[in-house]
């Protein structure tokens, strides 16, 4: 799914917009930390979304046992080994 792959970029952009808005609304409190908070938000979003993306990616390689043999779920003509 393309939506899942784009999720970190979309959430990071929303975080960037949030911190920019906060630096405009309260410049004395957030004006000098805008860049630091934006980078921290982007790394946090990437860190938290990484396991979900990897899990989704590897779920495409699932196998199912049929009559004692394992077959690739996406194409039952391909046998899984290991």
Image (cartoon, helix red, strand yellow):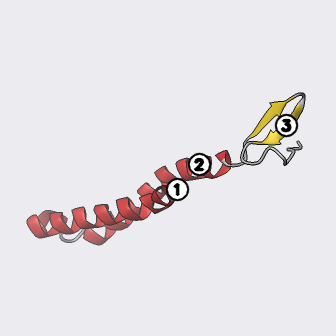
The residue that disc 3 covers is: 70
Dot 1 and dot 3 residues touching (CB under 8 Å): no
Mark 1: give few (<14), some (14-19) or many (20+) Cα within 10 Å: few
Dot 2 and dot 1 residues touching (CB under 8 Å): yes
Residue 75: percent from the left, percent from the top? 76, 48
Q: Which numbered dot is residue 56?
A: 2
Label 2 to label 3: alpha-carbon separation:
20 Å
Mark 2: give few (<14), some (14-19) or many (20+) Cα within 10 Å: few
Residue 62: percent from the left, percent from the top? 72, 42
Residue 54: percent from the left, percent from the top? 60, 51
Label 2 to label 1: alpha-carbon separation:
9 Å
Residue 32 placement, left or right of 7: left
Residue sitting at x 82%, y 31%: 65
Label 1 to label 3: alpha-carbon separation:
26 Å
Mark 3: give few (<14), some (14-19) or many (20+) Cα within 10 Å: some
Dot 2 and dot 3 residues touching (CB under 8 Å): no
Front residue of this view, candidates 37 and 60: 60
Give the vertical position of 39 relative to 56 (above or below): below
Q: Which comes before the other along the chain, label 1 or label 3?
A: 1
Front residue of this view, candidates 4 and 26: 4
Q: Which comes before the other along the chain, label 2 or label 1?
A: 1
Residue sitting at x 47%, y 58%: 46
Q: Which comes before the other along the chain, label 2 or label 3?
A: 2
Q: Quadrant of residue 72?
A: top right
Residue sitting at x 40%, y 63%: 42
**Of labels 2 and 3, the one closer to you:** 3
The extreme top residue here reads 67
Give the vertical position of 39 relative to 75 (above or below): below
Q: SS of the residue at dot 3?
A: strand
Q: SS of the residue at dot 1?
A: loop
The residue that disc 1 covers is: 1
């Amino acid at each position: 799914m393309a939506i899942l792959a784009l999720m970190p970029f979309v959430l990071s952009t929303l975080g960037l917009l949030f911190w920019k808005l906060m630096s405009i609304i309260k410049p004395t409190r957030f004006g000098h930390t805008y860049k630091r908070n934006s980078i921290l938000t982007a790394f946090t979003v990437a860190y938290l979304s990484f396991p979900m993306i990897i899990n989704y990616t590897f779920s495409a390689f699932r196998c199912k046992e049929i009559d004692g043999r394992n077959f690739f779920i996406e194409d039952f003509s391909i046998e899984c080994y290991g």
